[in-house]
C-alpha cells in the first residue's frame, strides 16, 4: 500500500502543545499541558536523582553519588572561576538552571517524550529570569555606577556616542541570544531526527539502512548538544553575573 | 570524645582562618576562564550573537514603524544598527576567548 502515497514527513508534529487539563483563570488560558507535565517530570527526576544518589553519604562515593557530586562541583567551580568568591551566593540559582536545562534536554532524548526546551517561550522565560536577576543584582550592588557597564574602557571620547548605544542594545540582546541558542539547537536536532526517521520508514528495508546509520550518529550528536547547551546556558549566566558583580568587561 | 581545651580551640580557629583565606585567594585571579566547551561551543556562541542582534534590532525597528506609521524607515535603520551590534558582540566575545591575541 505504501507505493504511490509519497513520503509522509511531519517533523514539527512532535513539538505540538496538547492541553491535558483545560484550565482558564480570568480569561487567561492556564491549561495543564504536556509541556507542564514534562517540566514536573524533569523536576521530580532531578530531586529523586540528587536525594537518592546521596542517601548513602559515603566517604568514598559510589557511581550515583559520584554523578551527583560531580554535577555539584562542576557548577561550584564554574562560579568560582568565572565570578569569584562573591559568586558563591548564586550557586543555588545557577545550579537549578543548569540541572533543569540539562534534564529537559536529556529527558527529551527518550523516544515519545516531549522536549520542553524546544519551545522558545520556555527558554526565553529562563533567559529573562537570568537577565532580570543580573540587572537587579547589578543595580543593588553598584547603584548608578552600574551604568558604567555601558561605557567601554580604553576608548577615545569621540567614539563614546556611537559605542554607548551599541553597548546598551547589546545588553538587551542578551536574553534573546541566550534563549535562541538553546531553543534552536533543541528544535533543529529533534526535527532532523524525525526527518531521518521518516526516511527510514519511507525507504523500507532495501534503502533505509543509510538514514538509520545517520540517526545513530545524530543521536550521539544530540546527546552532546544536550550537555553542551546546558553548559553554555550556565556559563553565560555566570559571565553575565560576573559583569554585574565585578563591573568589568 | 573529650572536650577540646582552649588551646586546641585556638589552634583550630587559626587553621580554619588560614584555610579560608587560602580558599578565597585561590578562588579568582581576575581572568575569565570562559571556554571549556570546545570548538562547537565557541561556534554556537559566536554565530547566535549575530542572529540575535539582528532579530532584536529588526523587531525594535518594526515596532517603532508600527507606532509612527513610517514603514519601512526604522526597520532598515535598525537592521543596519543590528549588523553593527552583532559584529561588535562577536568582537567582544572573541576578545574574551583569547585575551592574549588582543594585547599590544
Image: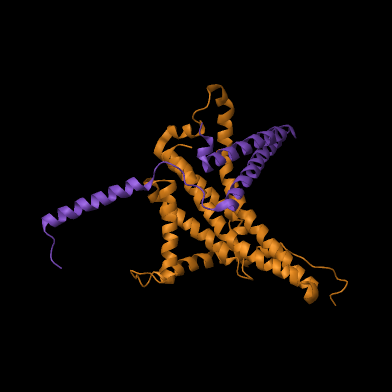
Answer with left or right where residue B45 lies relative to residue A246.
Answer: right
Q: Is residue B51 visible?
A: yes
Answer with left or right where residue A49 lies relative to residue A109.
Answer: left
Q: Nearer the viewer, residue A145 or A59?
A: A59
In the figure, B100 relative to A125: above or below? above
Q: Nearer the viewer, residue A30 or A196?
A: A196
Answer with left or right where residue B83 lies relative to residue A165.
Answer: right
Task: Please provide percent x and percent y for residue A225.
Answer: 59, 59
The number of numbered badges drawn on the structure is 0
Furthest toward the top, the residue is: A158
The picture quadrant where one finds residue A31 is bottom right
Chain A in the picture: what colour? orange
Answer with left or right where residue B48 lies relative to residue B28.
Answer: right
Task: Please provide percent x and percent y for residue A180.
Answer: 62, 50
Figure quadrant of the N terminus of chain A: bottom right
**Residue in the picture at 66% in, 41% down:** B54
Task: Please provide percent x and percent y for residue A127.
Answer: 54, 50
Amino acid at each position: 500500500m505504501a507505493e504511490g502515497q509519497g513520503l509522509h514527513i511531519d517533523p514539527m508534529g512532535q513539538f505540538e502543545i496538547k492541553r491535558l487539563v483545560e484550565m482558564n483563570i480570568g480569561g487567561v488560558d492556564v491549561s495543564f499541558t504536556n509541556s507542564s507535565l514534562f517540566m514536573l517530570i524533569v523536576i521530580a527526576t532531578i530531586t529523586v536523582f540528587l536525594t537518592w544518589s546521596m542517601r548513602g553519604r559515603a566517604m568514598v562515593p559510589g557511581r550515583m553519588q559520584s554523578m551527583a557530586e560531580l554535577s555539584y562541583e562542576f557548577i561550584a567551580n564554574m562560579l568560582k572561576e568565572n565570578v569569584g568568591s562573591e559568586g558563591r551566593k548564586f550557586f543555588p540559582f545557577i545550579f537549578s538552571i543548569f540541572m533543569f536545562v540539562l534534564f529537559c534536554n536529556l529527558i527529551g532524548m527518550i523516544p515519545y517524550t516531549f522536549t520542553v526546551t524546544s519551545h522558545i517561550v520556555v527558554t526565553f522565560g529562563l533567559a529573562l529570569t537570568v537577565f532580570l536577576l543580573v540587572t537587579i543584582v547589578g543595580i543593588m550592588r553598584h547603584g548608578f555606577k552600574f551604568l558604567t557597564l555601558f561605557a567601554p574602557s580604553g576608548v577615545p571620547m569621540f567614539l563614546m556616542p556611537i559605542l554607548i548605544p551599541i553597548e546598551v542594545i547589546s545588553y538587551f540582546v542578551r536574553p534573546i541570544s541566550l534563549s535562541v541558542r538553546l531553543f534552536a539547537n533543541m528544535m533543529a536536532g529533534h526535527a532532523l531526527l524525525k526527518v531521518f526517521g521518516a526516511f527510514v520508514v519511507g525507504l523500507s528495508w532495501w534503502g533505509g539502512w543509510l538514514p538509520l546509520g545517520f540517526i545513530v550518529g545524530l543521536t550521539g550528536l544530540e546527546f552532546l548538544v544536550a550537555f553542551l547547551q546546558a553548559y553554555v546556558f550556565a556559563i553565560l549566566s555566570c559571565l553575565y553575573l560576573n559583569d554585574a558583580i565585578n563591573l568589568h568587561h | 570524645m573529650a572536650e577540646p581545651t582552649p588551646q586546641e580551640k585556638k589552634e583550630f580557629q587559626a587553621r580554619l582562618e588560614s584555610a579560608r583565606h587560602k580558599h578565597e585567594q585561590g578562588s579568582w585571579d581576575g581572568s575569565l576562564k570562559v571556554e571549556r566547551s570546545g570548538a562547537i561551543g565557541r561556534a554556537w556562541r559566536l554565530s547566535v550573537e549575530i542572529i540575535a542582534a539582528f532579530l532584536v534590532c529588526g523587531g525594535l525597528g518594526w515596532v517603532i514603524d508600527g507606532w509612527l506609521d513610517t514603514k519601512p524607515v526604522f526597520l532598515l535603520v535598525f537592521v543596519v544598527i543590528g549588523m553593527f551590534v552583532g559584529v561588535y558582540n562577536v568582537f567582544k566575545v572573541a576578545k574574551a576567548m583569547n585575551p592574549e591575541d588582543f594585547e599590544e
